[in-house]
Image: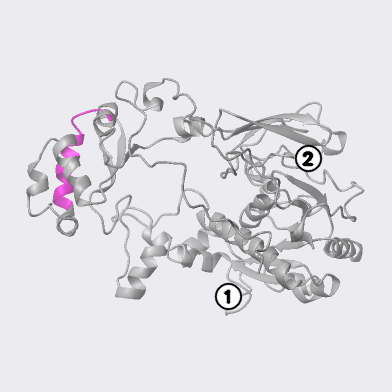
């Protein structure tokens, strides 16, 4: 039996070697010393990139805010034609979530002059998409969406459960129009259960599904995560589910209804914390940056800043004690010699380590830690993150030039993308996180301004030049 076209080839060896050694310049990391990053490593030996795997796949995007737009942006990055359907006057909620926003060009298209500046939030998760506006409160608007359903491979929506069905655009309605349609519903709590009609908000789900309970310092109130992690995780789950459904349709010829929600995504994301409760009945608590089962594994203050240190096993702790803290007795003291003993005597050990680290600066300790195999890192702000030598070395920026209606991207040694936006000019965005054979997927389109593509003539036609996933 021959393998399907999508079946993965299994590599029998890896061209890479693992190493715990970090690049060092005069005892410091590059972003601590202000020096240039090391020269590029040899090119990856197995070829430049891959063709866009979702080229020819059309995605009808009825989502807004973060979870849904994250999922559809990832599909768009892989080459899908994502048509973002927005409310006529305001569009996606995040268009109005400013400041901050991008500057407005005097040369912005006349049709967009009445719109507010493009918010940084919206720009973050809507690249490679086209925007049209449709009034779903009118029969004419609903008919437009039905025509788009007929010509689409995937529909993604994040309305409250049952809302689109009440408009005649539910799963069963759309399946009658297009039996091969993959219909992905992203909600707060799922399509069934007592909370099915409740709206989903990242921060509420963080609270309700355990994440906020375990986030924050032990002697302080619960805290939310610094970004909408539950929304982002749900978008990733939805993206993976849609890819799986495309493969399923390739086998069965039939569409799929995907039920993805914030609540279950967050419960799944509790990982070992959930397992601790399910297996051992152990209730969780807040530990700040510390780990409940590993010591030392947390942020420590030093003379002029903070360091994250993670001695995850006894060998690493021995190295920490002998070669970094220069107190070999810590590694032989029965109270600290094993991890379970260190957990039992956490407070005493942390006081000792904090006292030693407070004697010297962050740069001093970075030099001492480097190359010894004990996990460590400074607490970087966002500017330092984007100037991190690894961000530079991974070439995660794209230099873009305008060619017709698309953008041609070339990978450069910067940690951001530079796109030419019709209303904002050059904008900088975080690049796609994944490379294929050493090359990231091209950025074809900047995030659209509201209704930018409503009048395009190809919205109701298809050019199925893609492959098996559209058949």
Relative to 122, residue 174 above or below: below
| Mark seen at residue 195 | 1
Q: Quadrant of residue 6?
A: bottom right
Residue 358 is inside the magenta segment: yes
Question: Bounds of the magenta span?
Answer: 347-362
Q: Quadrant of residue 32?
A: top left
Q: Is residue 246 left or right of residue 393?
A: right
In the rendered image, residue 326, in percent from the top left (x then y), is placed at 13, 35
Which residue is nearer to you in this view: 442 or 40?
40
Residue 247 is inside the magenta segment: no
**Looking at the image, which residue is at 7% across and 50% down?**
333
Q: Of discs 1 and 2, which sits in the foreground?
A: 1
Q: Is residue 447 left or right of residue 413?
A: right
Q: Secondary structure at mark 2?
A: loop
| Mark seen at residue 115 | 2
Q: Quadrant of residue 351?
A: top left
Does the image show residue 420?
yes
C-alpha distance separating marks 1 and 2: 36 Å
Q: Is residue 378 left or right of residue 391?
A: left
Q: Dot 2, crowdedness within 10 Å: few (<14), some or many (≥20)?
A: some
Relative to 293, residue 274 above or below: below
Which residue is nearer to you in this view: 384 or 228?
384
Q: Dot 1, crowdedness within 10 Å: few (<14), some or many (≥20)?
A: few
In the rendered image, residue 222, in percent from the top left (x then y), is placed at 38, 58
In the rendered image, residue 285, in percent from the top left (x then y), is placed at 31, 62
The image quadrant where one finds the N terminus is bottom right
Relative to 399, residue 263 above or below: below
In the rendered image, residue 187, in percent from the top left (x then y), is placed at 63, 66
The image quadrant where one finds the C terminus is bottom right
Q: Is residue 167 left or right of residue 455?
A: left
């Amino acid at each position: 039996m021959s393998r399907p076209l999508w079946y993965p080839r299994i590599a029998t060896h890896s061209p890479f070697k693992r190493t715990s050694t970090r690049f060092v310049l005069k005892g410091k990391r590059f972003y601590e010393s202000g020096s240039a990053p090391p020269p590029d490593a040899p090119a990856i030996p197995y070829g430049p990139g891959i063709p866009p795997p979702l080229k020819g796949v059309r995605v009808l995007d009825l989502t807004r805010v973060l979870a849904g737009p994250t999922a559809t942006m990832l599909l768009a990055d892989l080459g899908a034609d994502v048509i973002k359907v927005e409310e006529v006057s305001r569009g996606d909620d995040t268009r109005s979530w400013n400041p901050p926003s991008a500057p407005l060009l005097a040369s912005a298209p006349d049709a967009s002059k009445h719109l507010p500046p493009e918010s940084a939030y919206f720009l973050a998760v809507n690249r490679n998409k086209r925007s049209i506006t449709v009034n779903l409160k009118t029969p004419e608007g609903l008919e437009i969406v039905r025509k788009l359903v007929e010509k689409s491979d995937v529909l993604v929506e994040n309305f409250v459960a049952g809302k689109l069905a009440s408009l005649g655009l539910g799963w069963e309605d759309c399946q009658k129009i297009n039996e091969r349609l993959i219909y992905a519903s992203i909600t707060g709590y799922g399509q069934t259960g007592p909370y099915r009609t409740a709206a989903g908000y990242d921060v509420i789900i963080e609270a309700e599904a355990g994440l906020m309970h375990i986030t924050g310092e032990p002697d302080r109130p619960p805290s939310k995560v610094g970004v909408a992690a539950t929304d982002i995780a749900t978008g990733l789950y939805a993206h993976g589910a849609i890819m799986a459904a495309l493969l399923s349709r390739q086998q069965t010829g039939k569409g799929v209804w995907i039920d993805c929600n914030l609540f279950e995504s967050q419960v799944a994301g509790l990982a070992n914390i959930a397992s601790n409760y399910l297996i051992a009945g152990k209730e969780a608590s807040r530990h700040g940056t510390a780990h409940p089962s590993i010591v030392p594994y947390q942020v420590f203050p030093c003379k002029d800043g903070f360091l994250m240190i993670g001695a995850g096993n006894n060998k690493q702790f021995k190295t920490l004690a002998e070669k970094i803290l220069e107190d070999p007795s810590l590694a032989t003291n029965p109270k600290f010699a094993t991890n379970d003993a260190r957990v039992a005597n956490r407070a005493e050990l942390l006081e000792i380590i904090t006292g030693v680290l407070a004697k010297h600066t962050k740069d001093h300790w970075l030099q001492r830690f480097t190359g010894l195999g004990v996990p460590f890192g400074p607490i970087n702000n966002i500017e330092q993150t984007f100037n991190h030598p690894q961000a530079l070395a991974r070439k995660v920026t794209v230099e873009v030039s305008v060619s017709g209606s698309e953008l041609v991207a070339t990978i450069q040694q910067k940690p951001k993308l530079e796109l030419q936006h019709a209303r904002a000019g050059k904008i900088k965005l975080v690049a796609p996180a994944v490379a294929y054979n050493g090359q990231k997927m091209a950025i074809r389109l900047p995030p659209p301004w509201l209704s930018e593509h409503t009048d395009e003539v190809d919205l109701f036609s298809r050019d199925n030049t893609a492959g098996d996933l559209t058949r």
